[in-house]
Image (tube, helix red, strand yellow):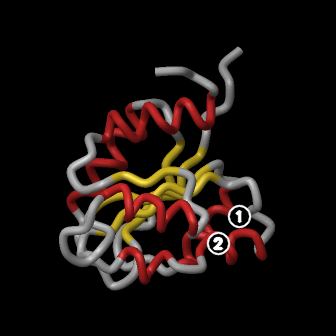
Amino acid sequence: MDKPKKTLVIGVIGADVHAVGIQILNYAFTEAGFNVINLGVMVSQEEYIEAAIESNADAIVVSSLYGHGELDCRGLREKCDEAGLTDILLYVGGNIVVGKQPFEEVEKRFHEMGFNRVFGPGTAPETTIAALKEDLLGEKP
């Protein structure tokens, strides 16, 4: 018997309107066997959380390309915890900070904000899929 598909809530956070990347991720995650709830662009923290609760999601994947992801993501883990989503995986990726900053520093800040995985600009969908399979299914790359 097939295992039930793991559910991902994906979207582009804040005032970001970059739609192409999220469609690519939607396709890639779906093809990889995930159940994908794509919220599209300009998604608020509350919308991610509501969709995760409604769909019993296993992970929230936040995308940001306009550089303000750090501000938009601040407090998301705490809001997830308050809503009872204490075990949900939080991923973030894209161009998530303003300007050129060492990725190690950016990654550290997002980990401190409660994100499980952080992906920089230009990360291939396959990299994120491998991480999801490892974190959600225990599959080693």
Q: Which disc is residue 50 wearing?
A: 2
Q: In the picture provided, is 122 more to the left or to the right than 118?
A: left
Query: Disc 1 versus disc 2: distance between alpha carbons?
Result: 5 Å
**Mark 1: secondary structure:** helix
Kind of residue at badge 2? Glu
The residue sitting at the top extreme is 1
Image coordinates for residue 12, horizontal then vertical, percent: 37, 69
CB within 8 Å, label 1 to label 2: yes
Q: Is residue 66 above or below residue 108?
A: below
Q: Position of residue 52 (x, y in %)?
A: 64, 62
Q: Residue at x 19, y 75 (%)?
A: 99
**In this rendering, position of residue 1 left or right of residue 111:** right
Residue 43 position within the rendered picture, expressed as x and y whole percent measured from the top left: 44, 77
Of 53 and 114, which appears nearest the observer?
114
Residue at 69% across, 63% down: 54
Foreground pick, 104 / 1? 104
Place residue 64 in its image quadrant: bottom left
Dot 1 corresponds to which residue? Answer: 53
- Dot 2 falls on a residue whose secondary structure is helix
Which quadrant holds residue 92? bottom left
Whole-percent x, y for residue 56 in the image: 71, 54
Classify 121 as above or below 41.
above
Q: Which mark is residue 37?
A: none
Q: Residues within 10 Å of mark 2 (few under 14, many from 20)?
A: some
Residue sitting at x 37%, y 63% = 63
Please tell me which residue lies in front, 135 or 17: 135
Which corner quadrant holds the N terminus? top right
Q: Quadrant of residue 75?
A: bottom right
Looking at the rendered structure, the kind of residue marked 1 is Ile
> Dot 1: within a 10 Å radius of its alpha carbon, few (fewer than 14), some, or many (20 or more) residues?
some
User: As displayed, is residue 75 above or below residue 124?
Assistant: below
